[in-house]
C-alpha cells in the first residue's frame, strides 16, 4: 500500500444501522433497518486491517452509526475476540461505543469493564434541549432513559464522556449545560455542531448571527469549564489549544478526516469508505456513492486503486490545497471536514463550510483570546 | 373604576425572560389577594391569597417571541440562576457568617451573577448594585429603609426624594433554600398617577415615589396585589420603570434570603407623571 495512506487512527464499524431513537438532526438514512453485521463480515474487516500496512500504531475501533447497544453483549464478546485474533503485535486496539445511553444495562456495564471499552454518551443537556431533538420513534423525549444509563455507568465506576450536539437553541444555555454536566458527573464533553449532511439538509446554525452566538457560547463555556473546580474537559478546547501550541509557520495540524485511510468506516454489509465517517451510506451523484469497496471482496489496497477512490481522494486533496492557500486558520485545522464540504458546497474540492466557520474559525478566535490575556471580571458591581 | 377603564390601562405582564429556562413556568406560581392594609407606618398586603383563575393567568402571562427577543420594560421576567452560584454564596456565608460589604469573595460571586445575567442579555444598566436581604419568617414586609425599619410596599429606595438619587431593584433572586415570595402591583408608576388624577387627586407632579404609593393605596385600599412564588434559584426581573413590590415571609421555616440586583436611579419621579412614561404599555404580540 502506498506510503501516503494511513496510518489508521479510527476504524468505525457499524454493527447495525438500526437505532432505537429518531433524532431530528440524524444523518443516518437507514436507521430503521434492523440488519446486523455477520460474523464473516466482522472477521473479514479485522483481517483486511491486519493484512494492510495501515495499522502501524495503536488505533481505536468505534462501534457506531446505528445504536451499538441494540445488539447484545454476546455479539461484542465475539467481535472483540476476532479483533484480538487479527491484531498485530505491538498495535494496541481500543474499543469504543458511541451510544445514546438508553440501553445501558448491567450486562453491558460488565462487558465494558471487562474489556475496558471507552464510552461516549450522546446527550444534549437538560430536557428542554435534549428532548427537543433527541426523541423516540413515538416522538417522546429520551432524557430520563439516558440519565438512567449514565447513572448505571457511574454506579459501575465506568469513565465516560459526553457528546452534545449544539443547535441554535443550545447557544443561549452554556450555564445550564455546564450545570447539567456537573450534576450528572460528566467530566469530559465534546460539542458537535448540527451539521448539514445527508438527510439533514439544513442546520439551525445556518442562521445569520449563529457565528457570533456560537463564539459567545464557547467563550462563556470556556470560563465555566476552566474557571471552576473540578475542571470540565472539553474536547474542542483541548484540541484547539494543542493545535495552537503545535502549529507554527512551517507546520500545521493535519485534518484526520481529510487524510486518506486515517479513518476507515465499515457498514454492516461490509461496504467501506474513508475520509469523514458520515459519508458511508450516503448518496453521491458525483461519485455514485462513497463506498470504495467491500471487505468481503476487496482489500484496502485494492480499494485505493479504484477509480472512485482516486477521484474522491484527488478532490479532497484539491480542497485541502485550496484551504491551505486561502484560509488563515489552516494551520489550526488542516483542511476541514470533507463530508461538510461535499454536502454544503457540493464538492470536496471546496473550502469554507458552516463547520469551518463555527468549529474551527470561531473556536480558534475564542481559544486564542483566552490564551492571550487573563479574563477580567466585570468590575461594575457595587 | 370600571372594568373597561382597567382594561385600557397599561399594566405589566409576566413572561419567562428570553434565553432563560424555568422548568415550571407560571404553573401554580401566581396568586392574587383582595387589597392592602394601611397603617401609619406602612402599606402591607392582606393575607387572603388565592390562586389565579386560568383567565387571569392568560391576561397576565405571555410568551415573548423568539430567542433574540429583548425583555421590554413593560414585562416582568421570570428567571433562574445556576445553583452553583447560590451554593458558592452559601459556602462563603457559612464560612464567614455574614456578607460584609466589600468582601472580595462575595464580590466575586456577585460578579459571576452579573456575568450570567449579562450573558442572558437582560437589560442590566452599566453599573449595578447587589446586596442580599435576609429576613426572618412571619413578615408581611421585608423592604427595609435606611433606619432599618420595615417599609411596606414601595418602588425601591424608601429614602429617595424627587431631588435625590436612590436605588431601585431591577431583579430579585431567591438565594434561600426554601420557596420565597415577592408581592407586587402589576401597574407601572404612570398608571398609579393616572388613576389618582382620574379620582380627582392633585399635586402629583412633585410627589416622591414613596408618597405616591401611599396616596395610591389610601385611595384604593382594595387594589389587589399579585404574589409570585419563587423556588430556590428563581428570580424575577422587575421593570426599570419601577414596580411597587415587597417581600412576604409568612409560612416560611427558614430565613428568607433574597439577592437584590439594583441600579441607581436619577432624581425621581416628578410624580410619575412626567419623569415616568405614561404612554400605554403595549400588549404582548
Image (tube, coloured by chain):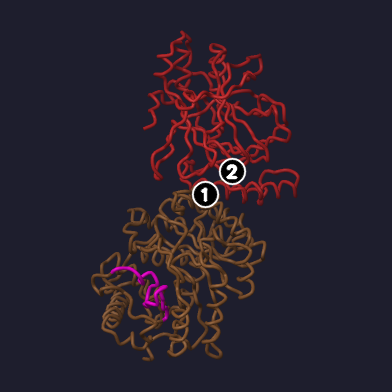
Q: Is residue A382 left or right of residue A242?
A: right
Q: Residue at x 60, y 56 (%)?
A: A148
User: Color used for chain A?
Assistant: brown
Q: Position of residue A222 (x, y in %)?
A: 52, 61
Quadrant location of residue B165?
Answer: top right
Q: Position of residue B276 (x, y in %)?
A: 44, 26
Whether labels 2 and 1 belong to a single chain: the reply is yes
User: Color used for chain B?
Assistant: red
- Residue farthest to the left? A286
Task: Quickly name the residue at label 1.
Answer: A127
Q: Is residue A86 left or right of residue B67?
A: right
- Asked whether residue A161 is in view, the answer is yes
Q: Position of residue A16 (x, y in %)?
A: 45, 68
In the picture, the quarter occupied by the N terminus of chain A is bottom left
Output the chain of dot 1: A
Write down the region rendered in magenta: A262-283
- Asked whether residue A364 is in view, the answer is no
Can residue A282 be found in the magenta stretch?
yes
Amino acid at each position: 500500500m502506498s506510503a501516503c495512506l494511513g496510518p489508521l487512527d479510527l476504524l468505525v464499524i457499524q454493527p447495525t444501522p438500526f437505532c432505537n431513537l429518531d433524532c431530528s438532526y440524524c444523518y443516518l438514512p437507514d436507521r430503521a433497518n434492523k440488519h446486523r453485521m455477520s460474523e464473516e463480515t466482522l472477521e473479514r474487516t479485522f483481517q483486511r486491517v491486519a493484512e494492510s500496512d495501515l495499522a502501524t500504531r495503536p488505533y481505536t475501533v468505534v462501534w457506531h452509526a446505528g445504536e451499538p447497544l441494540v445488539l447484545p453483549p454476546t455479539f461484542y464478546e465475539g467481535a472483540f475476540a476476532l479483533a484480538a485474533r487479527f491484531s498485530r503485535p505491538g498495535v494496541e486496539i481500543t474499543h469504543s461505543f458511541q451510544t445514546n445511553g438508553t440501553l445501558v444495562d448491567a450486562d453491558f456495564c460488565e462487558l465494558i469493564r471487562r474489556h475496558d471499552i471507552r464510552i461516549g454518551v450522546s446527550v444534549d443537556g437538560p430536557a428542554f434541549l435534549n428532548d427537543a431533538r433527541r426523541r423516540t420513534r413515538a416522538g417522546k423525549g429520551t432524557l430520563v432513559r439516558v440519565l438512567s444509563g449514565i447513572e448505571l455507568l457511574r454506579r459501575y465506576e465506568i469513565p465516560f464522556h459526553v457528546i452534545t450536539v449544539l443547535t441554535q437553541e443550545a447557544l443561549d444555555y452554556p450555564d445550564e449545560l455546564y450545570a447539567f454536566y456537573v450534576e450528572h458527573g460528566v467530566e469530559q464533553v465534546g460539542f458537535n455542531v448540527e451539521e448539514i449532511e445527508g438527510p439533514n439538509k439544513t442546520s439551525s446554525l445556518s442562521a445569520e448571527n449563529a457565528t457570533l452566538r456560537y463564539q459567545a457560547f464557547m467563550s462563556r463555556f470556556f470560563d465555566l469549564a476552566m474557571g471552576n473546580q473540578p475542571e470540565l474537559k472539553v474536547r474542542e478546547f483541548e484540541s484547539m489549544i494543542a493545535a495552537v501550541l503545535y502549529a507554527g509557520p512551517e507546520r500545521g495540524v493535519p485534518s484526520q478526516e481529510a487524510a486518506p485511510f486515517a479513518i476507515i468506516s465499515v457498514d454492516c454489509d461490509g461496504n467501506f469508505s474513508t475520509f469523514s465517517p458520515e459519508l458511508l451510506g450516503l448518496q453521491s451523484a458525483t461519485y455514485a456513492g462513497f463506498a470504495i469497496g467491500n471487505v468481503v471482496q476487496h482489500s484496502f489496497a485494492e480499494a485505493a486503486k479504484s477509480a472512485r477512490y482516486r477521484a474522491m481522494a484527488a478532490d479532497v486533496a484539491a480542497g485541502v490545497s485550496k484551504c491551505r492557500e486561502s484560509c488563515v486558520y489552516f494551520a489550526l485545522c488542516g483542511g476541514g471536514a470533507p463530508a461538510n464540504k461535499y454536502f454544503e458546497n457540493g464538492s470536496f474540492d471546496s473550502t469554507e463550510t458552516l463547520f469551518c466557520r463555527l468549529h474551527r474559525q470561531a473556536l480558534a478566535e475564542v481559544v486564542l483570546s483566552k490564551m492571550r490575556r487573563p479574563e477580567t471580571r466585570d468590575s461594575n458591581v457595587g | 373604576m370600571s372594568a373597561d377603564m382597567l382594561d385600557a390601562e397599561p399594566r405589566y405582564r409576566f413572561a419567562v425572560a428570553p434565553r432563560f429556562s424555568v422548568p415550571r413556568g407560571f404553573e401554580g406560581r401566581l396568586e392574587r389577594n383582595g387589597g392592602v392594609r394601611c397603617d401609619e407606618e406602612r402599606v402591607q398586603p392582606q393575607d387572603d391569597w388565592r390562586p389565579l383563575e386560568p383567565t387571569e393567568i392568560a391576561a397576565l402571562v405571555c410568551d415573548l417571541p423568539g430567542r433574540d427577543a429583548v425583555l421590554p420594560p413593560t414585562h416582568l421576567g421570570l428567571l433562574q440562576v445556576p445553583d452553583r452560584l447560590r451554593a458558592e454564596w452559601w459556602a462563603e456565608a457559612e464560612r464567614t457568617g455574614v456578607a460584609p460589604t466589600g468582601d472580595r469573595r462575595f464580590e466575586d460571586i456577585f460578579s459571576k451573577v452579573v456575568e450570567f445575567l449579562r450573558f442572558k442579555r437582560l437589560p442590566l444598566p452599566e453599573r449595578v448594585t447587589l446586596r442580599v436581604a435576609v429576613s426572618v419568617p412571619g413578615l408581611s414586609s421585608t423592604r427595609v429603609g435606611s433606619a432599618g425599619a420595615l417599609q411596606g410596599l414601595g418602588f425601591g429606595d424608601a429614602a429617595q426624594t424627587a431631588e435625590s438619587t436612590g436605588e431601585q431593584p431591577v431583579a430579585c433572586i431567591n438565594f434561600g433554600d426554601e420557596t420565597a415570595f415577592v408581592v407586587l402591583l402589576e401597574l407601572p408608576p404612570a398608571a398609579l398617577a393616572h388613576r389618582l388624577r382620574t379620582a380627582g387627586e392633585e399635586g402629583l407632579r412633585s410627589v416622591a415615589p414613596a408618597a405616591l404609593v401611599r396616596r395610591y393605596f389610601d385611595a384604593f385600599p382594595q387594589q389587589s396585589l399579585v404574589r409570585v412564588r419563587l423556588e430556590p434559584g428563581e428570580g424575577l426581573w422587575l421593570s426599570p420603570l419601577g414596580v411597587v413590590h415587597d417581600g412576604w415571609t409568612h409560612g416560611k421555616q427558614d430565613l428568607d434570603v433574597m439577592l437584590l440586583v439594583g441600579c441607581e436611579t436619577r432624581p425621581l419621579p416628578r410624580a410619575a407623571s412626567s419623569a415616568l412614561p405614561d404612554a400605554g404599555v403595549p400588549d404582548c404580540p
